[in-house]
């Protein structure tokens, strides 16, 4: 069975391997065991503490194949970004240059450095091993987070964002960063990406252009990738758009990939998920659902067939699923069709 659970200290080796496998552009998991251990420590602390409003918590989950005990994926939620370290984006805007006397009117796109998403919650750190990219595991690993948010809304902001990986080649070179590197930074994209991942962001404030950048002054290659996603990220973007996420003109400062956002009340899974009371019995249906318990420190989620009893607000799950979710008859779970 495939389950999702909070990360724990013994997952460090697996997390380090995922950091290696995920490659360039996966800023939230640097290939650095000390920093990964700190990430695990923060997650354990976040899951165990009482919370009444979004703060500096970081919830990191792993997907585990219970047959082998292998960790095959990760998925995370940051409760409120930018409270410790500045959280930068470029915002796409427009300026007008016009002359009534000469009958000239030109609109020019600009990129302005900003911290507009400070305090927003971010879904992040989504990675699934190639061996398990099947059976809707990718959808499960992304969508279960919205069940967790729906069940524990007090822990998160009203605005949820996701940064989508921008365009880069197999060597991690970004056409957008190449232009910034040439004119301002004098360091390659993987190095800048790694420094950000390990929390060394001072160079951004020190070296990033202080004034809006006129997009038409960038190289053609850089202009072409602004607000575009990496080909491997297209399915993830489509899933989030189906959930109600949309672009608001914010892009990543390194690869110019889009950031999408949604108010928590507009997320489809949050709206359409149901809380049901557990009955443990033989399941007659073959309809597949994502199911999670209502716990935090002992959170568990899986996907499995179940039988709904809508009139009684009850759900029938098998004994195996109940054990995986650590629930008993009469406990409450949250479900959504997958």
Image (cartoon, grey):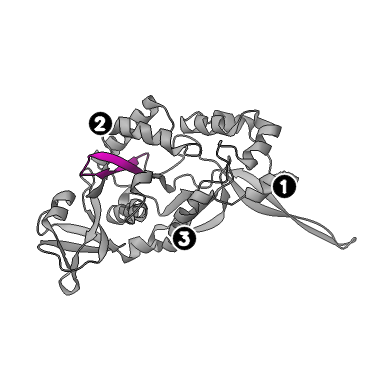
Asked if residue 278 lies left or right of residue 40, the reply is left
Mark 3 neighbour density, 10 Å: few (under 14) some (14–19) many (20 or more): some
Q: Which residues are magenta?
A: 56-78
Disc 3 to disc 2, C-alpha distance: 35 Å
Is residue 80 part of the magenta span, yes or no?
no
Question: Which residue is at a point 50% across and 31% down the rendered structure image?
Answer: 194
Residue occupied by mark 1: 220
Residue toward you, 48 or 233: 233
Mark found first going from the N terminus, 1 or 3: 1
The quadrant holding residue 206 is: top right
Residue occupied by mark 2: 10
Percent coordinates x, y for residue 73 in the rendering: 34, 43
Residue 209 in view in this figure? no
Question: Which residue is at a point 15% across and 71% down the rendered structure image?
Answer: 312
Residue occupied by mark 3: 241
Q: Nearer the viewer, mark 1 or mark 3?
A: 1
Question: Which residue is at a point 31% across and 51% down the rendered structure image?
Answer: 154
Mark 2 neighbour density, 10 Å: few (under 14) some (14–19) many (20 or more): few
Asked if the residue at tag 2 contacts the one at tag 3, i.e. Cβ–Cβ closer than 8 Å, the answer is no
Asked if residue 268 lies left or right of residue 336, the reply is right
Disc 1 to disc 2, C-alpha distance: 47 Å
């Amino acid at each position: 069975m495939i389950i999702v659970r909070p990360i724990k200290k013994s997952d460090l080796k697996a997390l380090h391997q995922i950091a290696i496998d995920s490659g360039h552009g996966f800023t939230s998991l640097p290939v650095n065991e000390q920093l990964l251990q700190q990430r695990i420590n923060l997650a354990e602390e976040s899951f165990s503490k009482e919370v009444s409003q979004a703060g500096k918590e970081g919830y990191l989950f792993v997907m585990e194949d219970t047959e082998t005990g292998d960790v095959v994926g990760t998925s995370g939620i940051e409760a409120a970004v930018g409270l410790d370290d500045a959280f930068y984006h470029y915002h796409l805007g427009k300026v007008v240059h016009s002359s009534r006397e000469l009958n000239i009117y030109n609109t020019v796109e600009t990129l302005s450095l900003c911290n507009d998403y400070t305090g927003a919650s971010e879904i992040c750190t989504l990675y699934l091993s190639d061996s398990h990219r099947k059976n809707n595991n990718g959808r499960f690993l992304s969508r279960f987070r919205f069940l967790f948010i729906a069940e524990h809304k007090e822990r998160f902001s009203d605005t949820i964002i996701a940064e989508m990986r921008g365009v880069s080649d197999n060597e991690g070179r970004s056409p957008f960063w190449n232009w910034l590197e040439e004119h301002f930074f004098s360091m390659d994209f993987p190095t800048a990406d790694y420094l950000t991942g390990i929390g060394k962001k001072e160079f951004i404030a020190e070296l990033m252009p202080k004034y809006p950048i006129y997009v038409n002054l960038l190289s053609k290659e850089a202009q072409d990738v602004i607000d575009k996603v990496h080909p491997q990220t297209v399915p993830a973007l489509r899933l989030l758009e189906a959930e109600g996420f949309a672009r608001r003109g914010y892009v990543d400062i390194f690869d110019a990939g889009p950031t999408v956002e949604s108010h928590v009340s507009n997320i489809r899974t949050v709206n359409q998920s149901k809380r049901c009371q557990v009955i443990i019995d033989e399941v007659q249906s073959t309809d597949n659902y994502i199911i999670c318990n209502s716990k935090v420190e002992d959170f568990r989620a899986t996907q499995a067939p179940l039988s709904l009893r809508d009139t009684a607000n009850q759900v029938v799950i098998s004994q195996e699923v109940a054990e995986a979710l650590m629930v008993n008859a009469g406990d409450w779970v949250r479900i959504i069709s997958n």
